[in-house]
Image (cartoon, rainbow, N blue to C red):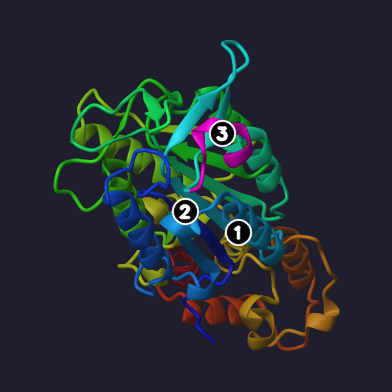
Amino acid sequence: MNSTGYPQGHALLIGVANYQQISCLPAAILNDVNDIAATLSSPMYCAYAPSNVVTLLDADATRAAVLKGLEDLSARAGPDDTVCVFFSGHGGIVGSPGNEDSILVTVDSDLGDIENTSIGSGELAAALAQIKAKRLLVFIDACHAGGAAISKRLTDCKGHEIKSGYTESIFARLAVGSGRALMASCRADEVSAVLRGARNSVFTTALLAGLRGAADKNASGFIKVFDLFSYVSEEVPKLIPNGQHPIFKADNLEVNFAVALSQGGKKAPYSPETTCMVNQDAPWSVLEQALVEIYPLGPRDQEVWSRAGGDLSRLQLHPTGQAAWHAAIRTLKQGGGGRSINFGSLLQTATEDFPNHPHLATLRAL
């Protein structure tokens, strides 16, 4: 068992730089996808299972392949999983004023038949809605400028053209639903910068740093959605003063959910700020909160309940990991859940898996 892995993490990462019929983009777009994939699947950073991180680059990022990738993602990700979808490439705006739609431009998009060869916001939103995971984060890095001002229109060699970019109303549409959020590289009237000679776009440079641990300022052992956006939104304007501001959209998001592990769960000793906050809560509540974070699939996750001496047959089934933990902790407080399990054995087992998790460390010190 890989006690510091994040098997519930799934990702679909799409990058298009070399379009078949439309102007190309900087090579940094492909680096962005490859570097995010490496960071998510690295045991030293986010600790996703490599098989759960799928990339579609250039020729592989056709309209059909992207839709199939989203379909496959919905098939393999369950309700208690965490899903990230990342797109870097051209975006376009079609339709008449007041009735505009934003489209995702795939490698095989044809400006002469753009509505049938791209992915509209309605189709993309429907595909995202099929994903059962209750934690979904979509990244859009579009409207790229490779060291110079980007054209406001996409053109081909046949005389066709459409407006480049996305609208913020479309971003909001893609973030509809409980536990759904979207992070975009820039505002609708800005460009996503790629500095000359840089390996990554400015947005992805900050995103990578955040995923590699910079967004985990309290050393919690997790990269969380609000913390990640807070970090990226602060860092990007430092690199492009007054020129680029990432945006965040969430329709019904109340929980600062974990996107990934931070440093594979191996962090420095917990911070005083975190322990002061935790000590105000009852030990049982703190333990439950920690267990929901590190074992989001419930007491069966990584066999933690059984390893702590519990009997899974004594627990009822629940639709989500959070509900399962709440019921299991209530049962344990009442003396049930198995003959050999108790508060101490459950805390000890979790601590062996995540020795530097701040909430667990605080409980052990009580």
Residue bearing the label numbered 3: 114
Query: Amino acid type of disc 3?
Result: Ile
Foreground of the two, 321 or 62: 62
C-alpha span from label 3 to label 1: 20 Å
Quadrant where the N terminus is found in the figure: bottom right
Where residue 360 sits: x, y (%)? 49, 68
Pointers 2 and 1 in contact (CB under 8 A)?
yes
C-alpha span from label 2 to label 3: 19 Å
Where residue 309 sits: x, y (%)? 68, 88
State yes or no: residue 109 in magenta: yes
- Left or right of 77: which side holds 25? left
Residue extending furthest left?
A: 197
Which of the two marks, 3 or 1, is nearer to us in this view?
Answer: 3
**Marker disc for residue 212:** none
Residue bearing the label numbered 1: 69
Which contiguous range is marked in magenta?
A: 108-118
Residue bearing the label numbered 2: 14
Tell me: residue 80, above or below residue 351.
above
Q: Secondary structure at mark 2?
A: strand
Is the stretch drawn in magenta largely helix, strand or loop? helix
State yes or no: residue 228 in magenta: no
Give whichever of discs 3 and 1 has the lower sequence position.
1
Image quadrant where residue 326 sits: bottom right
Query: Amino acid type of disc 1?
Result: Gly
Where residue 119 sits: x, y (%)? 59, 40
